[in-house]
Image: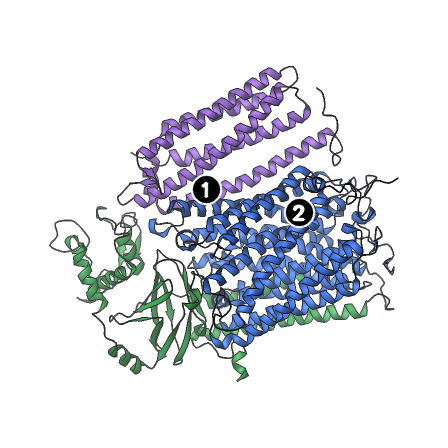
Amino acid sequence: MPDSPAVAPQFASVSHRDETAELGMWVFIATEVLLFGGLLLSYFVYRHAYPQGFATGGRHTEIVIGTANTAILLTSSFLVAWAVEIFAAETRRLTAGLLAAAICLGLAFIVLKGIEYHGEYEEHLVPGIDFRFTGDLANGVQLFFIFYFIATAIHALHMIIGIGLLAVLALLCRGAPSTRHRAALHSAALYWHFVDIVWIFLFALIYLPGRSTS
Amino acid sequence: MWRQWIPFWHPGVSPEGGDVDLLFGGLLIASALVLGLLFFLLALFCVRYRAGNDVDRENHEAKSWRWEVSWTAASLLCFLALFVWGASVYFELYRRPPDELTAFVVAKQWMWKVQHPGGQSEINALHMPVDRPIRVVMASQDVIHSFFIPALRLKHDVVPGRYQDLELTAQKTGHYHLFCAEYCGTAHSGMIGEVVVMEESDFANWLAQQAPASALADEGGALFRQLGCSGCHSVASKIHAPLLEGIYGSPVPLSDGSTVIADDKYIRDSILLPRSQIAAGYEPLMPSFEGKVTEDQLLRLVLYIKSLGRQP
Amino acid sequence: MTEPDYLNANYTLRSWFFTTDHKRIAILYFASLTLFFFIGGAAATAMRIELATPQADLVSDDIYNRLFTMHGIIMVWFFLIPSIPNTLGNFIVPLMIGARDLAFPRLNLLSWYIFMLGGSVTLFAILAGGIDTGWTFYTPFSTLYSNSYVMVAAAGVFIAGFSSILTGLNFIVTIHRLRAPGLTWYRLPLFIWSLYATSVILVLATPVLAITLVLIAVERFFGVGFFDPRIGGDPLLFQHLFWFYSHPAVYIMILPGMGVINELISCFSRKQVFGYKFVAWASLAIAALGFLVWGHHMFVTGQSLLASLVFSFMSFVVAVPSAIKVFNWTATLHKGSLRFDAPMLYALAFIGLFTIGGLTGLFLACLAFDVHATDTYFVVAHFHYIMVGGMVTAYFGGLHYWWPKITGRLYSEYWARAAAILIFLGFNLTFFPQFVLGAEGMPRRYHVYPPEFQVWNVLSSGGATILAAAYLLPLLYLGYSAFFGSRAPANPWDAPGLEWQTSSPPPEHNFDVQPVVTRAPYQYRNFEAEPQNA
């Protein structure tokens, strides 16, 4: 596999550069964990304060779409992991193909999310725009949906960035893959898996409350 | 004349104020000792070890972990003592107020509205008797304010959406500043008033001179009927709702097995969020009154329910 | 023929604005921060002039509120947080660890552009009409009641946060991966340790601010949100999230200053720092414990007594590592060979002012006294002793210390000492009276105040005038020296750090030969040596 001609002067070798890049991605993920951490903390505070409101809110979400999206994301993560595993000059078409498939799944996720948002809009469950849930639990349900929309929107934004990254890498890999691209793909895959893991948490917190009881 | 510029020259006029002043003095002395030692050492070393001064510098790289351990331990112990001292006075300051509502404070941009149970109300002023603990219950109509009386060494934020209560005791008659200490918008610095501490008899006179429309509890009773509360919470009602006579201050068993004391906060929460704490043996039927009653009206309802407790 | 130094490698604008050289990016940051420092300083000066009398005479209440908000936002996010890390840190870190650049040079440049974007957005918010929430953005005032450019200013701060994160990330990775051969962790200068601790906070705390600002923006834009008491939201949750970032942010501001002081004290005592390992680990201890004390901003909000107790206790505990540092610095002077060049004057001023700031911090950690003193001028005085007396003093000290390395020129020692002394006097005259005001009970953020507070306010305003003039001095003589000063030798202080082992100013890639480290830091060779000044 051809190596990129020169390493930036601050690095001693190619592997030095690539390991450094990977460490950078890990630190970035640490930042992201705290970003979602602040949001999840607010969720738990209000879920504790309004348990019934959150259970009712949870029952008003589309669990079919949520579950489908979970399956879609897990599959896409698998494909990305596979692409990282087989990355080599000889298998560049397959690598690019796997990434393309993962991108398609990512797009499917976004489309389904859009359909879900539309459904909630139809049901007048969008706080601040059209929220008509009344009754005693209205406050809890509204706080639940505020969390729902903020968390899923930020997650979707991460998905879109991830799709962009994978698309760039798919194009690069189709051309002339180098060790530099391997490192980049590795970091992008870390990011993609992280976004996936965030979704698993969101899935449990958004779709599951209120479903086990009656 | 110049004495007025010295902080804490006017001692706090509340019983805990003296403790806070003492604590302040203690902190000042501790700091002065530390700073004195530090500045002495700095000055000493700067003069003695200035470059070119011919002094003994043998073993200048010598180190000892004993120094590290001793000054770490010394600071920790010293800090621990200050922590305990500060915390014990804090518990005094914020101890649970006695069950004697004497004034209700509504904070809004940019004024303090004080209401006395007899219906007397005042703006940016709080009249209170000397040497008698009174309790203020505070609520905010809009943003966060902070009720601050420097002379009493007391302060408490007034956060919208909840009641805060505070016990005040003034041991000396006089006029004292009342400040809003939490930035609350344009005229934040105009949200100041005065606390007037009077002799008991003067205070009674003052209350009598004010012309109240009617006692707050009576207005609360009118609201109680007007909002339809009496439709359910009465003996004659067919709907199974708890009777409120004598409930104030008594323990209420809840449906989840726990028990709460029916205080102002509980009653307020029960009006606004009736399903958060449901009394045992009752169906959660009551609608929420959130957004339908103002803080002023809530206060009157609470007072009315409280007055029910007094009548046998 | 030697390689040209980084300043003379290329003169085009493009070579500055698209540079990936950490040294040039440091200069870009230095120029922008200087601008922001004087904007924030101008706001402070206007406030102090207004406060010279108890009535409103210079500005209206709305303008006054905008002034202190602008002062806070600019100074915190656009000067103090980036000050030492992004200028001195950017310049010195790779040199100190024997690297040819930071790990991610392009990310470094990107972080400057993001910073400038955030700064421009914030300046736009100020010019468009300002923002009146205070730098703390407390809800529900900021979300539902303020009629000012809250969203735009929050967006500016939000954007600048990414710049902080990228800088922190770059430092962490650089310090882990790019140290010169032989440069083990315990051979690192303490400046590096403290910047490492700072970077950890930058990376872990800033995202919490980011999400909090998003929640604010959503609530303001849609009219409902997490902190809206009308739908059962809790305004105090905002304060928890905000201070979870903003208290560690205080350590972001002071830790790099402490790092600089280690370098100055040891250089001008010509000795190792006393208790190197204790000082190094104290930095990390501050970074870790700093995450556990945010609730001490909320002792009077009605948070549970137990929470107050825990936060008060932790606040005392976090003061221990700071105390350790002060003691070690003082012990470093013992049996040293002390010279009192301008950087050393700043370092000594730092120790004194930081200690006063730290001790008054204990007053505020002390629950019962905090009830009286919080939200008064006592707090204002306390954190200015830390932020200005500590951080800005350290910044100036470090700037003078490394100025010959950065510019290759020597500044006027006479003017530098005069400025240092003037800053020290002006600072104390400005802020010491504010302790008295706070203890007397004057609340902060007051545009008009009862007349009995006037005497101390006049003193403070007088001090502020001196301080403002004193801060202008370095701009003049340092600016002059950058162009007309005499040439600096490679190692004017005769210091052993790696940054002094290359020419002044350094070549584009820092070292002609990759340095190898074989010994502990701060090994000053000639104990009694006179620096080869001039």
Location of residue C64 in the rendering, given as x and y in whole percent from the top left corner: 49, 63
- Image coords of residue C39 (percent x, y): 59, 57
Quarter of the picture holding the N terminus of chain C: top right
- Judge from the rendering whether residue A201 lies leftward or rightward of residue C99; answer left or right: left
B270 horizontally vs C270: left or right: left
**In this rendering, do the residues under marks 2 and 1 share a single chain?**
no
Q: How is the image coloured?
A: by chain
* Residue C179 horizontal side relative to residue A214, left or right: right
| Observer able to see residue B234 | yes
- The amino acid type, in three-letter code, at marker 1 is Leu
Q: Secondary structure at mark 1?
A: helix
CA distance for labels 2 and 1: 28 Å
**Residue of label 2:** C196
Circle 1 residue: A40
Taking depth in this image into account, of C402 and C183 the one nearest to the observer is: C402
Q: Secondary structure at mark 2?
A: helix
Question: Which chain is displayed in green in the rendered image?
Answer: B
Colour applied to chain C: blue
Query: Residue pushed farthest bottom?
Result: B1
For the colour purple, the matching chain is A
What is the number of the mark on residue C76? none
Chain under numbered label 1: A
Residue B12 in percent (x, y) is at: 46, 76
Amino acid bearing label 2: Tyr
Query: Where residue C291 appears, x then y in whole percent?
Result: 55, 51
Q: Residues within 10 Å of mark 1 (few under 14, many from 20)?
A: some
Residue plotted at (38% across, 28% down): A115
Closer to the camera, C286 or C470? Answer: C470
